[in-house]
Image: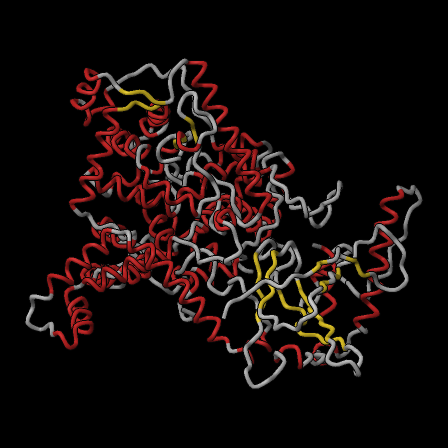
Amino acid sequence: MKCHRPRVGPGRPFSSCWRPVPAAWRARAGEMLQEESDLSLLIAQIVQKLKGSNLYAQLERQAWASLQRPEIRLESLKEDIKEFFKISGWEKKLQNAVYSELNVYPLPSHPAAPPEHLKEPLVYMRKAQGSWEKRILKSLNSMCTELSIPLARKRPVGQQKELLNKWNEMGTDEPDLSLFRPVYAPKDFLEVLINLRNPNYENGDSLSFRTHLGLIQVPLKVKDIPELKECFVELGLNIGQLGIDDSTQVPPEFFENEHVRIGQKVLAEQDSAAAQQYIRQGSPTALRAELWALILNISSQPEDLLYYEQLKTNVIQHDLLVDSLIYKDVKLTASNDDYYFVFEDYLYQVLLCFSRDTSVLGHFAYNSASPPKSYIRGKLGLEEYAVFYPPNGVIPFHGFSMYVAPLCFLYHEPYKLYQTFREMYVRFFFRLHSISSHPSGIVSLCLLFETLLQTYLPQLFYHLREIGAQPLRISFKWMVRAFSGYLATDQLLLLWDRILGYNSLEVLAVLAAAVFAFRAVNLMEVTSLAAAEAVLADLSTLKVMPLLQIFLFATVT
Amino acid sequence: MSRLSVPCHVKGAVALQVGDMRTFQGRPGVVVIDVTFPSIEPFELQEITFKNYYTAFLTIRVRQHTSAHTPAKWMTCLRDCCLMPDPHSEDGAQEYVSLFKHQSPSVTFPKWLSHPMPCEQSALLLEGLPDPSRVSSEVQQMWALTEMIRASHTSTRIGRFDVSYLFPLLGLHCPEQVRPHSPLCYRWMAVMT
């Protein structure tokens, strides 16, 4: 496990295990001994997870079926079956599944650590997340009582038929949503983050060296440019990138043709780890849909289609209050967007099903957030009558539908689109709207952005502060939406390629800082927050990869 | 072999102060926690588990009674074990930690208890620099003084402390940014957190 490159692995590096041993000790005590037991624990955890999966059942079936084959002999049964798996490609599928688990789930924690510790190790952050959730729930409940609409109700049969008929064109519906309002907007969430404080970290009343000059006041560890350069080494100046070296001025023989050829090979091998490494240099448009599916370990089986159809049935049969929130959000955001309005119907088909998907509840094991719990009428406090609301535990906020919109360019079958979105959400997007200390969590991203700007563009930072235009107030909305709706779609997809490739959202903070660096000259001349926002209002002409590359590799540090 | 938890009594934390300074404002960075074992039967300590709360470095010393005739000796079994790689940030601040001993069947006592850690001579780093313990006590005294003055809200102007020879570029408030590798700074960083 030690040879596993940290940046491809899970969020917390393997070496930050719960057992610190000073260097002199390690040599005597035998590092291998402790590492072996850590490894066994990790293997046991992954085996446990995979045992319940579809893949396990398939492997079992295949193993049984293979007994018919002539090359399987009784005396060497185990080896022969293993060999068969290797040749038939099942071993590769298993490898991909294991790799996926390593990427998504955090490492096994200390045996004494409670489950909350795995969600979020810092107590004050857990508390802040809890208070935030209470506020959201209160807002939702008050909307519910004001409008006298139940949180959930069964649709009458007539309405069910009607909905089924217009399932593919729900966008033509114009329900009266004027009374509904989004439960919260990104700027409300920013206020909560600004007020986050570590009770053990005393700043004193006056400005001291320990006060952060930006808005975020919690001392999380963020990378500086030398560390980012090490982390994002494949974005270096002398390495080919899609988004730079595929422009019309560059002959395709230099880079593009070879890169496409390698991409096709990676797809033929069906190797997740290789795909993840490959996509760091960008994905050719034609291969992107398949590459993302491979990296996210999504294989479209008949069972997946059935599962989606089941969710669709749930949507038809029951009406949830969050459905109206979703409608409202789509109408306010994606429908107004030049690039995404054509996909309005798809968005409903995905998001309405998403709200009802209880398999999403699994991600709350490593998300600092917890799903809102509701009780059957009259049974408050009784656990047997507790349900999660919405069934997937995720309450959409203003702009939520923009997480789905760019994916519509890649996938045309609703169930594939759905699977990809769900996987992207439980791997990445959930971190953008929950309070946690994770390096890819929104708090760390904000701090990373502010620190980069302050360190490498101090004059700009100071100027913006002085005119009352704290840079984070402008860039927060970009990062919360992972730049969806702000960049041109092809650029956005190139950015999301890197999110997948590096299994990290830090690239969002770096891009935000790079955008400020790019428009620094104009920003130095503005004298108000409104003017600063105007300078940064339109990002649709920006080219993402040159900005990232120059900021990381061509800035004097 | 089953593992049992050993009953132990953990006394409250006591702050250590440098020199004779009797001030309540100064926040020392070193705290001592005494752990006693009420059980009389001897046992082999395998693992110490605790939850950290913003401690950067940990030293464990053990006083062992070997026999009735020899006086009990203090031994260091763990020195400056790093619990927080960056004391100014949250990494490792609230983690659960286990410290193990290595099983050494040939030795009666656990190896880690019988061999005290030798005093590390970081002589290479300290050439040409002032004596760290002297600097440490001076800086700590000045820090305590600052805190006292801040607390007493005096209106008299305070002249600048002459620390220019120690921190040529930075003011009094940022000592830890200078020479991050010296032992002085580690202890200082523990003060800051």
Q: Quadrant of the C terminus of chain A?
A: bottom right
**Relative to A236, is A277 on the left or the right?**
left
Q: Pinpoint residue A377: horizontal percent, then vertical percent.
A: 41, 21
Q: Pinpoint residue A459: horizontal percent, then vertical percent.
A: 62, 47
Q: Residue furthest bottom?
A: B106
Q: Is residue A103 above or below residue A153?
A: below
Q: Pinpoint residue A525: horizontal percent, then vertical percent.
A: 57, 38
Q: Is residue A263 above or below residue A527?
A: below
* Residue A396 can be seen in this image: no
Which of the 4 image quarters holds residue A425? Answer: top left
Viewer-nearest residue: A403 or A536: A403
Q: Pinpoint residue B14: horizontal percent, then vertical percent.
A: 78, 58
Q: Residue furthest front?
A: B41
* Residue A259 can be seen in this image: yes
Which of the 4 image quarters holds residue A205? Answer: top right
- The residue at the point 29 percent across, 51 percent down is A296
Viewer-nearest residue: A158 or A487: A158
Viewer-nearest residue: A381 or B179: A381
